[in-house]
Structures are given as structure tokens and as C-alpha cells.
Image (spheres, helix red, strand yellow):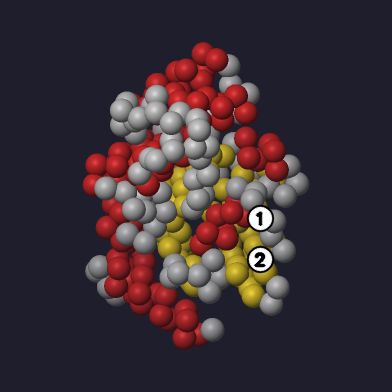
Amino acid sequence: MIRVETVSKRFGDVVAVDEASFEARDGLVTGILGPNGAGKSTTLRMIYGLLRPNGGRIDVDGISVAGNPLEAQARMGALPDVSGLYARLTSREQIEYFGQLRGLSSKQIEANVQYWTGALGMEGIIQRRTAGFSHGERTKVAIARALVHRPQNVILDEPTNGLDVMATRAVRDVIRALRNEGCCVVFSSHVMQEVSALCDRIVVIVRGRVAADGTPDELRQRTGHPNLEDAFVALAGQKQETL
């Protein structure tokens, strides 16, 4: 479970996140939505410890990310918006290396490499160096690398951005499988069809503030729009008008 309490982040005079609060629970997929520049990626980076908040608190399974970063990060797997693969290593070597960094045994690493290779459809690229990979191939490797230790909490920043239909379907299936295993999954996306199909709860962020937090049905009911995209536009527009 991930709990974000009145978290703020400033970059100079710019307030990127402004006292945001929400919870992402185990066994649920929590979507983070918002216009470009709303503070979604900044919020996710603070959750997995890449950025330090200027105020507030973030706990992962009751562990403070600021107070015990290594312990909190051990319970998370994160796919940032930039994959950062090592071009000279093969897909297998990338995943194995991160498994070693996570302290897994050789047997655990091999089992998990096999699992994610199959789950993400990576059989054709697992022995290839990642230099020259397509965006979709790079994303698959980055996801497998992030999840090699089978974490309880998973943070994905626009995981299907730029993927083809088959790769997108594989990633969505992984997200559903993680939820069914009782994991806490947090992901951002601009694809409303994807959000509607996957999310149990949705947190709408506008100009760094939480404009809405609820199930898709609750957000539709609140705005009076049966279409989730229309509901999102209404919520984002209302929040901007009040700021």
C-alpha cells in the first residue's frame, strides 16, 4: 500500500505538486491522470524516491520513503518515463543485473527471467543486445527489469506510450495479473480507454493538486458524464477555473 500525505514539490518558484494526498491500495490499480505538466511524473518520482518532497510524507507499506529509502524502494518496482537501458547488454543481462542488485539468488533470477520473458512476449529479443531496439522492445525490457524481484508495489509512468497493439496488450495483461496477485499498482496514462479498462481508482491531478479521487463510476457520477473522458475533461476544467 502506498500513502501520499500533503506532499509538495517546488522547483525554484514553480510549484509542481501542491499538498497532494491519496492512497493506492493492495489488489487495486490506481490511475494517475492529469493534463501535461500537471505534476503526475513528479509525484511518481517522489513515490519511488528519485525526488525528495519539500513537504509532506510518503509511506510504502508503512515505511517512510524519506526516512528509510532503501527499505521502501526494496518493496517497489518502478518504470520511469525514461528506461535508461545499457545498450551493450542483452535483454537477459539487463534483467539479471538488476536481479543481482536486488539481492536475488541465481535460481530466483533465472525463474523470474523466464517468467517475465513469457509474460511480456520477449522470447525473440531476450538474447539480443538492446542497442537498436524499438521503443516497444525497450519498454518491455525496462518493465521486466523493474519487476524482476516481484515487488509488492509497482509504479508505471505511461507504460504503453508508443507501443504497438500487441505490446500494449501484453503490458495490460501484466498489470491485470499484478492486481490479481494482490499487488498495489500505480500508473499514469493519457489513454482513457486503457484507464477505463484497468483502473479500480483514479486520482486526477491538475496544477499539482488532487482535483478528484474515486472509482471510475464515482467520477462519472460526480460530473454527470457517462463517458470517462468527458468526466476527466470536466474535472480538469473545473479545477483550473478555481485556481
**Distance of label 1 from label 2 (alpha carbons):** 9 Å
- The quarter of the displayed image where residue 129 is located: top left
Which residue is situated farthest in the top direction here?
Answer: 107
- The residue positioned 30% from the left and 46% from the top of the image is 168
Image coordinates of residue 96 in percent, x first then y, are 52, 25
- The residue positioned 60% from the left and 68% from the top of the image is 17
Image coordinates of residue 230 in percent, x first then y, are 29, 72
Mark 2 sits on what residue?
A: 9
- The quarter of the displayed image where residue 190 is located: bottom left
Which sits in the foreground, 146 or 26? 146
Task: Check if mark 1's residue and mark 2's residue have beta carbons within 8 Å.
Answer: yes
- How dense is the environment of label 1, judged by Cα within 10 Å: few (below 14), some, or many (20 and up)? some
Mark 1 sits on what residue?
A: 51
Image coordinates of residue 235 in percent, x first then y, are 40, 75
Which sits in the foreground, 108 or 141? 141
- The residue positioned 42% from the left and 75% from the top of the image is 236
126 sits left or right of 65 in the view: left
Image coordinates of residue 117 in percent, x first then y, are 37, 27
- Check disc 2 and give the amino acid type: Lys
Work out which quarter of the rendered image holds the N terminus and state it.
top right
Which sits in the foreground, 24 or 53? 53
Element at label 1: loop
- Using the image, determine if residue 239 lies above or below residue 152: below
- How dense is the environment of label 2, judged by Cα within 10 Å: few (below 14), some, or many (20 and up)? many
